[in-house]
Amino acid sequence: MLHTLILILVILAMLGLERLITTQALKVPSRREFIRKHFFLHPNGISLLRIPQGLISVYMIWNGYWLTAILWFSFWMITDLTDGTIARGCDLMTPAGAWLDPLADKCMSFPVIFFLALADQHTFAPRLSLTWAIAYCVIDTVGQCSRFFCEKKAANSFGKVKTALITVLIAILALQQFCMFRGLDMVPPLSQINQTVVDYMMIACTVLAFLSLYCKVIPSHLYANSLTMLNFLCGILATYIAWSHSTPRFFILAFVIIFLGQFFDLFDGKMARKFGSTPRGAMYDDIADGTNFGIACGSIVFRTLTCASMPMRWTFAAFTAIFYLICVIYRLLRFLKPTVKYPAGIFQGLPSPAGALMAGSAAMCAAQLNARVATYCCAAVCILSSLLMISNIPYRHFGRDLWPSLPKGLRIFILIIAILLTCFALVKRGWSQAFIILTVFLTIAYALIGLASKGYIEKLTKQQSESQQE
């Protein structure tokens, strides 16, 4: 275990050292000029150097040098951050770099992906699924080729998260192979990864690759509606699972799908503000939110309250779920025609995604505790979330205000952690409890941090009035 921990710390130290050296180099004009004069320090030069490193890493692994291969691969994947930082800091962004950088990423990852899926005599369980490896590489290759016939050549958010996640997956598998090869123990939670978790992570990478491709080939004004449709489908699937099964494990699965839909809902508004939408985009968004955060979450609440080992009366459970659903619908309708005028970026009442997170996490806690007092506490929390949604309490917009205020690297890190935790929650019972704890923490955090003070509202109102006058 100590060897594995040291190796992880060395890789993190390499990442921290790269960030320190790169940022310090770009602060001094003479250093920036030095970078401009040497092509091998240019973003395109770094990308060209990165292209053969995937095959070199596979050659090292083939000859049994797992440790060297892991450090070598990690170093060159870290340079993917370096070239982007240099491109922005030294004004070296070029049209060729927009497709060369992701091409280098693919040349780095594809050989390792196929090696981890095919080389039986050199790898141990768990392994990458060959089917999903082929699907991922085909979709990602089409996405790379789309840059030659599409106007959108730069990487989008889905592509960046996909690249980061596939790198994390390769690193985890390589660490496991190294430990098994040397007979070492893994560091928790990496020791909890099994074949099913790996398959889920690979599926997540493939879905992200498809979404990245999809956003390149469709018109920009359809971005928002596409994400809204995914949110709607999450609601339909979660509702079906909640009503077709009667065990807590499937209720957790349904809640995870609702949680996934919240990410689509987070980005559809951002895409609508940035690229526009269709005339009825706001109505479609309300329908999707009502399905996922209203019907699906209400179904989970009712099924949990009536299927626990010590269930409450179904009439009271039905009242709780229906009251919650009515409040969600009212909240969504009031969003279109608010009764209290707040500046843009301020919600009137708790947003419906946060309300679903609060009610759903309470239901999951009740399902895990399996006690009568837990079911009644769950009902109380659901009613509380319903009242908060229809209240006039001002809340800051998460997607417009809180989320964009985070650094881009931190946002990608949070998304990766959320995906990893979701994959663990779907497989490991203990991790499903950790997932529930996370959602409870997020609910409490937003319920407190998201509150908009009177001074903040006045400041926002003043800023918007000044911008309109200009």
Image (cartoon, helix red, strand yellow):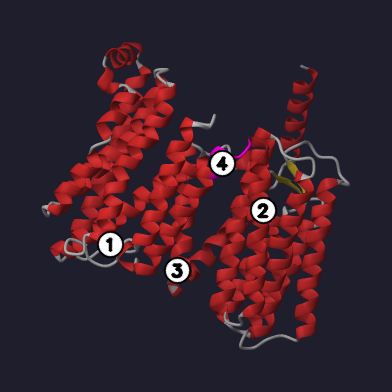
**Disc 4 to disc 3, C-alpha distance:** 32 Å
Image coords of residue 378 (percent x, y):
67, 74
Dots 2, 3 in contact, CB < 8 A = no
Q: Main secondary structure of the magenta part?
A: helix
Q: Vertically, is 230 above or below 147?
A: below
Whole-angstrom CA distance, mark 4 to mark 1, is: 37 Å
Depth check: 135 or 258 in front? 135
Q: Amino acid at mark 4?
A: Cys
The mark nearer the N terminus, 4 or 3, is 4
**Number of numbered labels in the structure image:** 4
Q: CA distance from mark 2 to mark 4?
A: 14 Å
Q: Which quarter shows the C terminus?
A: top right
Task: Sort mark 1 into few (<14), some (14-19) or many (20+) by Cα contacts within 10 Å.
Answer: some
Label 4 close to label 1 by CB (< 8 Å): no
- Quick one: SS at disc 4? helix
**Residue at the spot x=34%, y=25% of the render?**
43
Amino acid type assigned to the residue bearing label 2 in the image: Met
The circle on residue 431 is 3
Mark 2 and mark 4 lie on one chain; the one further toward the N terminus is 4
* Gap in angstroms between the C-alphas marked 3 and 1: 16 Å
Looking at the image, which residue sits at the far right? 339
Image disc number at residue 229: 2
First-in-chain label (4 vs 1): 1
- What distance separates the C-alpha of mark 2 from that of mark 3? 29 Å
